[in-house]
Each structure stands twice: as C-alpha cells, then as structure tokens.
Image (cartoon, grey):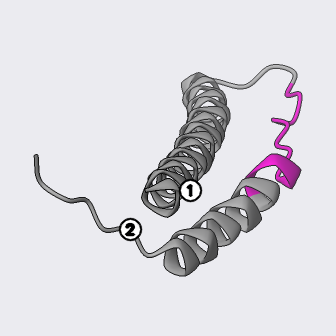
C-alpha cells in the first residue's frame, strides 16, 4: 500500500481560505427586483436573476461540502497518525 503524505499546515490553510469564501458567498444575498409589466426582455432578465441565485446556492453547497470533506480528511489523517505512533511506542 502506498504512503499518503499530507501537509497538515497547508491543508488547514486551504480550509481557512475556503471557509472565508463560504462566508462571503453566504453573505451575498441576492433578490431580484419586482417588475410590473415589461416585455420579453424583462422576463429574460428575471430568468438570469433566478439562474444567478441558483448558481450562488450551488457554489455555496460545493464550498461547504469541500470544507467538510477536507476537515474529515485532516481528522482522519491526524487520527491514524496518532494510532500508528502509539503502536510504535508500545513496542
């Protein structure tokens, strides 16, 4: 089995960067203006606004899941590293 090397400091730094991005995305609340009347251009602009909202929420979900995955990876790596060092120290 191949050894997997993970730089924990670098991983933590990237997690913090993603958490900052996550906060920025979640604070970016978008609401489309209510328009009365209008033609096909207004309808298309409303569709674009709805697509932007969907994109924003999808990006937030992606970043949130990535942060969660990276946190789990870090915890797993640190935990298995501690277990391995405990086994070695017991011998």
Please tell me which of labels 2 and 1 falls first in the chain.
Answer: 2
Residue sitting nearer the eye, 10 or 49: 10
Task: Answer left or right for 91 relative to 39.
Answer: left
Residue 6's disc is 2
Quadrant of res 50: top right
| Range shown magenta | 25-35
Q: Secondary structure at mark 1?
A: helix
Q: Which residue is mark 1?
A: 82
Q: CA distance from mark 2 to mark 1?
A: 14 Å
Please state which of the two labelled residues, at mark 2 or mark 1, is closer to the viewer.
1
* Membership of 63 in magenta stretch: no
Res. 33 image quadrant: top right
In this view, the residue in front, 46 or 78, is: 78
Image quadrant for the C terminus?
bottom left
Q: How many marks?
A: 2
At which x and y percent is residue 27?
Answer: 87, 53
């Amino acid at each position: 089995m191949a050894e997997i090397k993970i730089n924990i400091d670098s991983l933590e730094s990237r997690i913090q960067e993603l958490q900052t991005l996550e906060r920025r995305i979640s604070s970016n609340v978008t609401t489309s203006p209510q328009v009365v009347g209008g033609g096909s251009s207004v309808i298309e602009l409303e569709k674009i606004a709805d697509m932007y909202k969907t994109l924003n929420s999808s990006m937030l979900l992606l970043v949130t899941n990535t942060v969660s995955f990276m946190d789990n990876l870090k915890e797993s790596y640190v935990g298995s590293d501690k277990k391995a060092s405990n086994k070695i120290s017991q011998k």
